[in-house]
Image (cartoon, grey):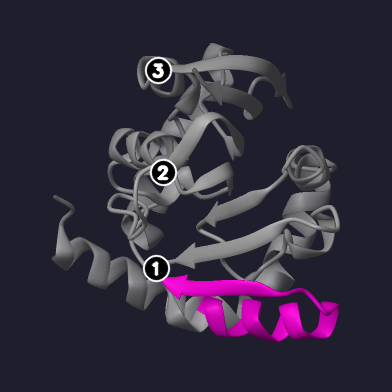
């Protein structure tokens, strides 16, 4: 089970930050994650669940015809995503919830997407297990995140930054979801590691 007290703290942090998130992330994304959202969303199809949808920055990039459900821990972030969906003419079901305990039945979705979200989930192994559970057999998992670099000097700098980011917003800098994805039973189909090994894109299938 997830730590409810920890979730309440994270919810408060992201609720307070929601109004500044898009402005602050614009520069960071261009510098560090350029093209990542497009890479992920272009491969989504069918019934799609986006975990940690945040303010809905992926919404412009999904193909026409997908059925979208978005989940996030922060109601304030979801409020912004809801406005963005209306402005884009996107039909999306948005709900508040915990990535570590997804409120959906087994085998509910054809695609699960998570971009820049697993780094902020307290138990990323549990979240990936839940993504596996709610995917249909043959369904696709699509991830984009910053990860711990394989270059020692870069990893050392990330470790120092992590001491601050964990206290501020529960954000891990040195994780790497890929091994957990494989351990959960997914078969990795595509994987790209970029930016001195600090960014990874993953496309995997539920066998």
Camera-side mark, 3 or 1: 3
Cα separation, mark 2 vs mark 3, equals 13 Å
Which stretch did the figure color magenta? 77-96
Which of the pair 36/105 is nearer the observer? 105
For disc 1, the marked residue is 73
Badge number at residue 98: none
- Could you tell whether 97 is left or right of 33 in the image? left
Label 3 sits on a secondary structure element that is loop
Cα separation, mark 3 vs mark 1, equals 26 Å
Which of the pair 181/167 is nearer the observer? 181
Q: Quadrant of residue 172?
A: top left
Camera-side mark, 1 or 2: 2
Q: Earlier in the sequence, mark 3 or mark 1?
A: 1
Label 1 sits on a secondary structure element that is loop
Q: Earlier in the sequence, mark 2 or mark 3?
A: 2
For disc 2, the marked residue is 134
70 to 76, vertically: above or below = above
123 to 180, vertically: above or below = below
Q: Residue at x 70, y 62 (%)?
A: 25
Is residue 88 found inside the magenta-colored segment of the image? yes
- Could you tell whether 23 is left or right of 185 in the image? right
Q: Quadrant of residue 174?
A: top left
């Amino acid at each position: 089970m997830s730590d409810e007290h920890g979730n309440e703290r994270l919810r408060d942090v992201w609720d307070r930050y929601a109004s500044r998130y898009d402005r602050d992330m614009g520069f960071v994304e261009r510098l560090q994650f350029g093209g990542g959202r497009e890479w992920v969303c272009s491969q989504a199809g069918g019934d799609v669940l986006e975990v940690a949808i945040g303010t809905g920055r992926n919404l412009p990039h999904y193909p026409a015809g997908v059925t979208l459900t978005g989940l996030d821990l922060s109601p304030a972030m979801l409020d912004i995503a809801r406005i963005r969906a209306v402005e884009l003419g996107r039909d999306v079901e948005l709900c508040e919830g915990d990535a570590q305990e997804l409120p959906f039945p087994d085998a509910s979705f054809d695609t699960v997407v998570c971009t820049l979200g697993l780094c902020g989930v307290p138990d990323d192994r549990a979240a990936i297990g839940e993504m596996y559970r709610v995917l249909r057999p043959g369904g696709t998992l699509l991830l984009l995140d910053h990860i711990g670099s394989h270059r020692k000097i870069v990893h050392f700098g990330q470790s120092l930054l992590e001491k601050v980011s964990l206290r501020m917003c529960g954000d891990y800098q040195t994780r790497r979801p890929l091994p957990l994805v494989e351990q959960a039973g997914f078969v990795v189909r595509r994987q790209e590691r970029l930016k001195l090994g600090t960014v990874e894109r993953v496309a995997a299938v539920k066998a």
